[in-house]
Amino acid sequence: MGKVHVLEHPLIQHKLTYIRDKRTGTKEFRELVDEVAMLMAFEITRNLPVQETTVETPVMETKASVLAGKKIGLIPILRAGLGMVDGMLNLLPAAKVGHVGLYRDPKTLQPVEYYIKLPSDISERELIVLDPMLATGGSANDAIHSLKKRGAKQIRLVCLVGAPEGVELINKEHPDVDIYLAAMDDKLNEKGYIVPGLGDAGDRLFGTK
Ligand code: PRP
Ligand code: URA
């Protein structure tokens, strides 16, 4: 079964508090999501493989390390996942970016896919699916199925806030996918919002509603 990692770095937790705060406006919300995404990129790349090389310093030649292994693909789930892309790209500038457009039907809470555009070599990349919210898990589940159908072999899911229902669904449907969260919240309310959560991530990021 995929592991669930809650990233407890104090900077992530501090910024998440202001992201949750209903008084935080769009500009600051967007900046904070960007910063937390960058910090999460730092945390989730701790175990990337490196290989030995040599480098000539101004003083002498010495042994050194460079990243080895698979290239990375970032896959934001539209819309809200877009808010996490730039922060991740700050640390992973060579990553390619694919987009999966999904929205949750407000009545049925079922995800509806309306767009997909991916790098041609996704089967050779380690994919990092980005979405601030993992609520029922329907959107992430569909996005991951879509990626696998198109050849993806290695996928991780990175969200700001998760609900137990979403984590359970991804673990059941995709036991090969590890989940990284800044927080694991309590539950969903009757409208499918995460409690305590942060409200509607897309609306808060883009100032809609
Ligand atoms: C939100 C959020 C996730 C989804 C999570 O998107 O960004 O994609 O809901 O809910 P789930 O786990 O129950 O599927 P939304 O459907 O509101 O679309 P938007 O990003 O375009 O606002
Ligand atoms: N989507 C959001 O944007 N927020 C939630 O709490 C649940 C789904």
Image (cartoon, rainbow, N blue to C red):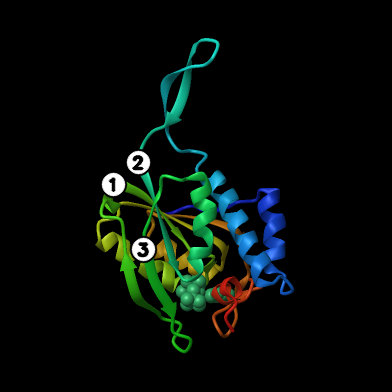
Q: Disc number at residue 124?
A: 1
Residue 103 against residue 131 in the figure, above or below: below
Q: Amino acid at mark 2?
A: Lys
x%, y% of residue 92?
47, 45
Marks 1 & 2, CB-CB < 8 Å contact: yes
Is residue 136 visible in the rendered image? The answer is no
x%, y% of residue 105?
44, 84
Q: Disc number at residue 140?
A: none
x%, y% of residue 142?
36, 70
Q: Secondary structure at mark 3?
A: helix
Residue pointed to by mark 2: 70
Quarter holding ligand 2: bottom right
Residue pointed to by mark 3: 144
Q: Secondary structure at mark 1?
A: helix
Residue at 60% from the left image edge and 51% from the top image edge: 7
**Mark 1 to mark 2: distance in Å?**
7 Å
**Mark 1 to mark 3: distance in Å?**
16 Å
Binning the other alpha carbons within 10 Å of mark 3 as few (below 14), some (14 to 19) or many (20 upward) gives many
